[in-house]
Image (spheres, rainbow, N blue to C red):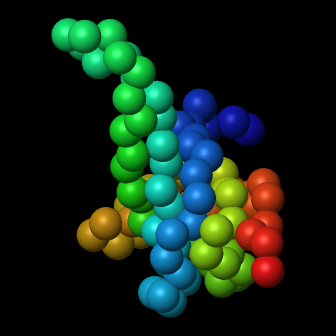
Amino acid sequence: MERGNRKSRIGVVVSNKMTKTVVVKVERRVADPKYGKIVTKAEKYKAHDEDQACQIGDRVRIVETRPISKDKRWRVAETIEKAEA
């Protein structure tokens, strides 16, 4: 049974120093409202990584979930691409 559409983002792991938590940087390209120039905006999300399998540089998909802690509202759904060793 589907719970509804959950938000998902694709980003790169920039930190995995916390236990069962990774920081994922998600970049998006938007047009400047006044001048129209395309700029890259980035946002960092703390995501739950139960298996502690993510390494820095991995490209991952995160999905929205219930609040796990004060800052964590996302969890790692899948690893799209592993970082080069």
Looking at the image, residue 35 lies above or below residue 46: above
Looking at the image, residue 61 lies above or below residue 68: above
For the N terminus, the quadrant is: top right
| Camera sees residue 20 | yes
Residue at the spot 64% in from the left edge and 68% down from the top edge: 57
Viewer-proximal residue, 79 or 69? 79
Question: Quadrant of the rendered structure where residue 58 is?
Answer: bottom right
Q: Residue furthest left?
A: 34
Looking at the image, residue 24 lies above or below residue 32: below
Residue at the spot 37% in from the left edge and 38% down from the top edge: 41
- State the image coordinates of residue 19 (x, y, percent, origin top left): 50, 89
- State the image coordinates of residue 61 (x, y, percent, origin top left): 66, 51
Viewer-proximal residue, 4 or 26? 26
| Camera sees residue 48 | no
| Left or right: 45 in relation to 77 | left
- State the image coordinates of residue 32 (x, y, percent, origin top left): 29, 18
Viewer-proximal residue, 29 or 63? 29
Looking at the image, residue 35 lies above or below residue 49: above
- State the image coordinates of residue 69 (x, y, percent, origin top left): 35, 72
Viewer-proximal residue, 5 or 60? 60
